[in-house]
Image (spheres, helix red, strand yellow):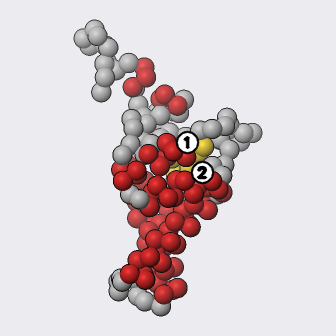
Amino acid sequence: MASSARPGTGPSGEFRYPGNRLGLPEDGPGAAAGWGRRILALLLDWFIAGLIASAVTGKPIWAGGNDFGTAQLVTFFGMTAILAGLAGGTIGHRVCGLRVLSLRSGPDATGYAAQVGLLGGVIRAVLLCLVLPAVVYDRDRRGLHDRAANTIVVRR
C-alpha cells in the first residue's frame, strides 16, 4: 500500500480502501464486494448452469464430456449476461448479497446507479468466460471484465 513521504502518516486518501476513488463507502451496503462473496457467487452460478446443462443434455452433472461442458458454458454465459445486465446481478450475486452497478451514470431516485444494460452484461460475461480477465484486477477489486463494462460489484 502506498503511503505519504512523511513516516507514520499512513496511506494517502486515494488508497485508503477499495472503492474509495469511486466514491463508494468503506463498509456496509454499496461498498466494494469482498473476494469471498464474489467467489462463492461465481461457484453457485456455475453449479446452477451445470444443473441446467444436465437437464438439457440428459447427462448427470458429474458425467462431464464435451457436449455437457459446452452446454454448461453457454448456459453460464447467457445467465450471467442477461441477469447481470438487466437484473443487476446473477442468482449467485443475490444469494450472496451482491449487486452489479454501472459506473457510467449517476444514481437514480433509489440512490443506486442505473442498470448495466444488456451490452454491458454481454461484455462482462464474455470476458468472465475467458477467465483471465476476471483474475486480473485493480485496487478497487474490479477485474478487467468489470473495467471493460464499466461496472463494479458491491454489497447490497
**What amino acid is found at the position of numbered circle 2 in the picture?**
Gly
Measured from the top left, where is residue 16 in percent x and y? 40, 26
Please tell me which residue is depicted at 39% across the width and 35% down the height of the picture. 139
Question: Residue 112 is drawn in which quadrant?
Answer: top right
Q: Quadrant of residue 7?
A: top left
> Crowdedness of circle 1 by 10 Å Cα count: few (<14), some, many (20+)?
some
Query: Residues under labels 1 and 2: Cα distance?
Result: 8 Å
**Residue 117 x/y as whole percent:** 66, 52
Q: Residue furthest left?
A: 7
Local crowd size for mark 2, using a 10 Å CA cut-off: few (<14), some (14–19), many (≥20): many
Residue name at image x 46 percent, y 71 percent: 73
- Number of callouts: 2
Q: Secondary structure at mark 2?
A: helix
Query: Residue drawn 49% across and 42% down?
Result: 147
Mark 1: which amino acid?
Asn
- Classify mark 1: helix, strand or loop: loop
Marked residue nearer the N-terminal end (1 or 2): 2
Residue toward you, 149 or 29: 149
Q: Is residue 55 left or right of residue 85?
A: left
Q: Residue 61: name its quadrant.
A: bottom left
Q: Which label belongs to residue 150?
A: 1
Q: Nearer the viewer, residue 69 or 21?
A: 69
* Residue at which label 2 appears: 120
Q: Are marks 1 and 2 in contact (CB under 8 Å)?
A: yes
Q: Is residue 141 visible?
A: yes
Identify the residue at image location x=32%, y=14%.
4
Residue 28 in sight: no
- Coordinates of residue 156 in the picture (x, y in percent): 56, 48
